[in-house]
Image: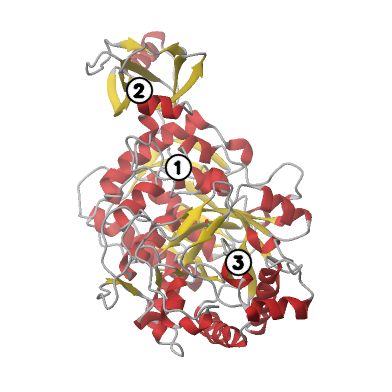
Amino acid sequence: MQLTRMLVLALGITVAQAQTPIHLIPQPVSVQTKSGTYRLTNSTSIQYNQPAGKATADLLAKQLNGPTGFSITPKSGTSGSIQLEINTTPDAKLGDEGYTLNATTKGVRITANKPAGLFYGAQTLTQLLPKEIGSKTAVSTNWTIPAVQITDYPRFGWRGIMLDVSRHFFPKEDVKSFIDQIAALKYNTFHWHLTDDNGWRIEIKSLPKLTSVGAFRVARTGHFGDRADPKPGEPTPYGGFYTQDDIREIVWYAQDRNVTIVPEIDIPGHSMAALAAYPELSCTKQQVSVNPGTNFADWYGNGTFKMKVENTLNPSDENVYVFLDKVFTEVAALFPNPYIHAGGDECYKGYWAQDPGCQALMKKLNIHHVEDLQGYFMGRVEKILAAKGKKFLGWDEILEGGISPTATVMSWRGIKGGIEAAQMGHNVVMTPTTFAYLDYNQGDNSVDPPIYATLRTQTSYNYDPVPDGVDAKYILGGQGNLWTEQIPNLRYAEYMLYPRSWALSEVYWSPKAARNWPDFVTRMENHFDRADVAQINHSKAVYDAIVKTSMNGDKLMLNMAGEIPGLTIYYSTDDTMPDQFSTKYTQPVALPDGPITLRVVTYRAGKPVGHLITLSRDALMKRAGQ
Ligand code: ACM
């Protein structure tokens, strides 16, 4: 910069004043940077031209006043230095959620057709301010906004994040913080996974045991999935649930932030918490416990499995449908979203196969495979939902055993369910494990707590939700899914969300043609700094080496890569701590024989970044499939 100025002076030419770099996530449709800045002060005013703009104006003022220490009070009008304008003549290209933002040296004007667009313009405005805008206390800095002209609107109408509050309970204030965070990234859908084997989290007044029993489990520590079974009569201190007042409060809170909530009641499988409360709804009617994370299933590696403890509702029992009618009557009344997600995933049919009632039902329905009972069950559920004015949405297993043409499918087992569903004319929400599962670990299994798969930020970033050969009109959009078996609290939820939810926000919001990984990396690093100020946790696994091995004859080959540009990888195999004077990795190499340990570090611009990765020969051999 200095050098440019000197050259400019020396050569006697003039150039535009340097522009402040802009680091927006998700990337807008169009950004034209201008010279100059607008400086926010205590005399900055926020005005809105229509009452519908007040909610965003108030939220924005709150967001600005805290860290700046200013006391901006929004009011109705057309001459605010920050002006929020609902278009009196709609601008067709902006749709319901788009906006324009014009920042000059005089102020900022945001226009939109609808309040949602103003809200998103305000989120962009916040990201144009220095990172200190995320501070939890008032700080002093130069509150400047670079002059810029932005036009922006989303690629998809459904931009979601799912949070599982069953495996671990997230208190109401945490859920609100989660909603704040996703709304700031222009996600508009919060898929709330409210029930599962490990806790029922929504108050159903007509079925009080769902929460008095189903929301609480025995206390356990240690790896989820390997924990000890509950003992008879053991106290159940862990858990919690949302009262209906809590739910209404959260729904309103979300609405102010243009977030709609899709509730999920996961049936007929994943129902152990409900069965702990009402065991008569299962086939065996045996008392089960709300599961604290035991090893309750045998997995066979190809997606098939056997439940060692019953967790399915009995599809042949009319009382089950009476129960579901009560549940969905209350759920439907609480959530304005047109959809209710009724699960349908991972339903083990072994108990159905042995149940005389299910066999009689199969005979009556002329069904020969027990799997097809799920189609019958889901069809009954869809009718119950329709009677409450709700649309049925389920995981892609609902394609098995028959599905009604009006069902919407959430594709999770890769993209094939989504392709099949769209080709059958169903609406689809794409949320495949391979790109969108935020519970998978982000870096090396030896560094991040291991989980059954890894999903790197770059992989999420490179996702395209419209599969080849599919008519885009059936793809409503997509989601990231945060399952919480190994996520005990909000802080760790954040660690797993970021940076992948930044990447996915761009996948679901920004034009496909704007996708640019190196450019995203620059913006991601800026957002690391912003998240630090905002005390939002995030993973830095993108700075770690990707370590792979393979066999070449009897030689163990090492193959490493970096996820982001500019990373240099150094390693040792001689029991020394590696640094930038160790062996530099440039291409696949054969590792020395013997009981070696590989140690890997990464450097960027001459500085160590990322974690030390340490792997024994045994671990390296295992990685090579040996
Ligand atoms: C799922 O991950 N079981 C939908």
Decide if residue 387 is in sight here. Answer: yes
From this viewpoint, is residue 130 visible?
no
Per the model, the C-alpha gap separating discs 3 and 2 is 42 Å
Residue drawn at (33%, 56%) of the image = 44
> Looking at this view, is 264 or 276 the one in front?
276
Relative to the observer, which residue lies in front, 317 or 260? 317
**Amino acid type, residue under disc 2 in the picture:** Arg
Count the labels in the image: 3
Q: Please say which color scheme the image uses.
A: secondary structure
What is the x, y in percent for residue 81?
40, 55
Q: Which residue is mark 3?
A: 349
Going from N to C along the chain, the mark reached first, 1 or 3, is: 1
Mark 2 packing: few (<14 Cα in 10 Å), some, or many (20+)?
Answer: some
**Mark whose residue sits in front, 2 or 1:** 2
Asked if the beta carbon under badge 3 is closer than 8 A to the nearest atom of ligand 1, the reply is no
Q: Residues within 10 Å of mark 3 (few under 14, many from 20)?
A: many
Three-letter amino acid code of the residue under disc 1: Leu
